[in-house]
């Protein structure tokens, strides 16, 4: 059973600001390419409509913020928190890096390679979070699912545009 945590509104706010901030940084690299470069790419039938991406990512970054909060709130109570925080930080950086590679640098190939690393770091983070707080791990499942879809999209768009 997960140990209860003492609620900290400051830690919760900072956790959400960190993750939504990463999403904001990623969107800086993404936004300008959507109506131009991305619109010009050949897409497959599994490509969702563009309007879905922003609300999906905002929701996923919010869930990541809550997941991070549940782990951070246990700092000092649990062992191995530093590994969980490190894995979480790396996957967050990889998330922003993917936006840079795919949308800003227009590299379908490097985006496809990088998103596979992102997927593995999200999975490793969820596994590590599960050993500390199951709720935190479960909050990463929608993110992992969406990055699975994004990986398939990246790869199918790569092959459709070779």
Image (tube, grey):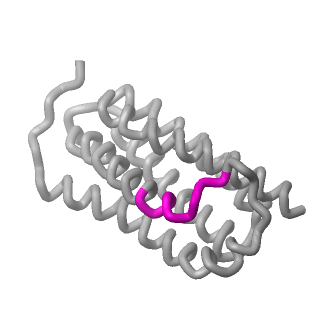
Q: Residue at x 47, y 39 (%)?
A: 125
Residue 52 percent across, percent down from the top left: 49, 58
Q: Residue furthest top?
A: 1
In the foreground, 42 or 136:
42
Horizontal side, residue 159 vs residue 138: left or right: right
Q: Is 39 rendered above or below residue 13?
A: below
Residue 154 percent across, percent down from the top left: 71, 55
Q: Residue at x 37, y 26 (%)?
A: 131
Q: Quarter of the image containing the C terminus? A: bottom right
Residue 8 percent across, percent down from the top left: 11, 50
Q: Is 162 rendered above or below residue 73?
A: below
Confirm whether the magenta stretch covers residue 54: yes
Q: Residue at x 23, y 24 (%)?
A: 2
Main SS, magenta region, reads helix
Magenta-colored span: 47-55
Q: Quarter of the image containing the N terminus? A: top left
In the foreground, 99 or 68:
99
Q: Residue at x 37, y 59 (%)?
A: 19
Image quadrant of residue 61?
bottom left
């Amino acid at each position: 059973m997960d140990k209860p945590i003492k609620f900290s509104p400051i830690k919760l706010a900072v956790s959400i600001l960190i993750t939504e901030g990463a999403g904001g940084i990623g969107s800086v690299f993404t936004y300008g390419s959507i109506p131009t470069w991305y619109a010009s790419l050949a897409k497959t039938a599994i490509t969702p409509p563009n309007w879905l991406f922003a609300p999906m990512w905002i929701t996923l970054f919010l869930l990541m913020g809550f997941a991070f909060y549940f782990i951070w709130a246990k700092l000092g109570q649990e062992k191995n928190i530093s590994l969980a925080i490190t894995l979480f930080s790396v996957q967050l950086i990889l998330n922003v890096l993917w936006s840079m590679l795919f949308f800003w640098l227009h590299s379908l190939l490097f985006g496809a390679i990088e998103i596979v690393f992102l997927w593995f770091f999200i999975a490793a983070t969820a596994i590590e979070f599960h050993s500390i707080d199951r709720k935190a791990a479960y909050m990463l499942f929608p993110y992992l699912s969406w990055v699975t879809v994004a990986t398939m999209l990246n790869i199918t768009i790569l092959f459709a545009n070779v």
